[in-house]
Amino acid sequence: EAGITHVPGTFSSSTVFNLNLVSNPFPDWRISPTFTIGAGYFDNVPQPTLVAGEQFSGNSALAGIGLRSFLSRHFVARVDWRRHVVLAGDESNREYDEFSAGFGFFF
């Protein structure tokens, strides 16, 4: 899966671009686990009103787990937790957690 996420915030805003591999080892189960690994790019921009705001960008990697449930034949719900590790370029890594929930449909 491919994803673009924008996270607006009070002190800074972040944009994340990802390409992920998602595995669903038990597709026949009504509620089944999902496993995700991926890579991408992370960009953090501080708000202009901050004096000591730090802008950083870097490549990122992620791993995550989740649950997927078919609510009907054409309607699915999914929840995920993902841990992002951003290589910030100053020989340190920054870690962020992402929690998401959503619905999908097929036609």
Image (cartoon, rainbow, N blue to C red):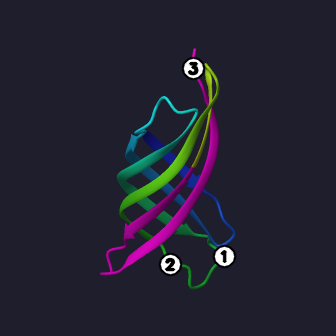
Quadrant showing the N terminus? top left
Q: Kindly check if marks 3 and 1 are in contact, taking CB atoms under 8 A apart as contact.
A: no
Q: How many marks?
A: 3
Residue 49 in percent (x, y) is at 66, 76
| Identity of the residue drawn at 50% across and 78% down | 54
Query: Within 10 angstroms of label 3, few (less than 14), some, or many (20 or more) residues?
Result: few
Residue ID for mark 3: 106
Q: Which mark identifies residue 54?
A: 2
Expressed as whole percent of the image width and height from the top left, the position of residue 5 reads 54, 50
Going 42% across and 40% down the picture, which residue do you hit?
Answer: 2
| Of pointers 1 and 2, the one earlier in the residue sequence | 1
Q: Is residue 4 magenta?
A: no
Give the number of the disc on residue 49.
Answer: 1
Residue 60: give x, y in percent of width and height. Answer: 37, 61
Span colored in magenta? 80-107
- Amino acid on which disc 2 is placed: Glu
